[in-house]
Amino acid sequence: MTLDELRAELAKLDHLPGDTPVILAKDAEGNSHSPLTEVEHAMYLAETTWRGEHYMTEAARQTQADPDDYDEAPDGSVNAVFLWPTN
């Protein structure tokens, strides 16, 4: 899903009150659920069509006390929106 597709889906829900909780499924089968706690702009490197790795943006990496403790996003990484569950 792209950010444009997510925005379109969320636009369909604009009739809901602003305090409606956002819940994430653990997996595609809905085996468990957890409230959304954080939204992050970071970098993503796909390893397969269903799995990949998360990296900080270069700007975020440079704000760390020791940026060298964090790997740079490899070539081929793309900007992505990460949604983090509470648990």
Image: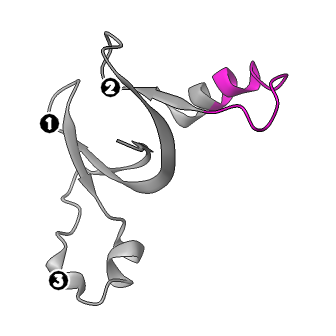
The percent position of residue 15, horizontal first and vertical second, equals: 85, 22
The percent position of residue 61, horizontal first and vertical second, equals: 32, 76
Cα gap from disc 1 to disc 2, whole angstroms: 20 Å
- Name the side, left or right, on which 49 lies relative to 6: left
The percent position of residue 80, horizontal first and vertical second, equals: 42, 46
Q: According to the image, label 1 marks what residue? A: 47
The amino acid type, in three-letter code, at marker 3 is Asp
Element on which disc 1 rests: loop
Q: Which residues are magenta?
A: 7-21
User: Does the segment drawn in magenta span residue 44?
Assistant: no
Cα gap from disc 3 to disc 2, whole angstroms: 32 Å
Please tell me whether residue 23 is drawn above or below residue 44 in the rendered image.
above
- Name the side, left or right, on which 16 lies relative to 5: right
Instruction: Say which of marks 3 and 2 sits in front.
Output: 2
Q: How is the image coloured?
A: one colour
Q: According to the image, label 2 marks what residue? A: 26
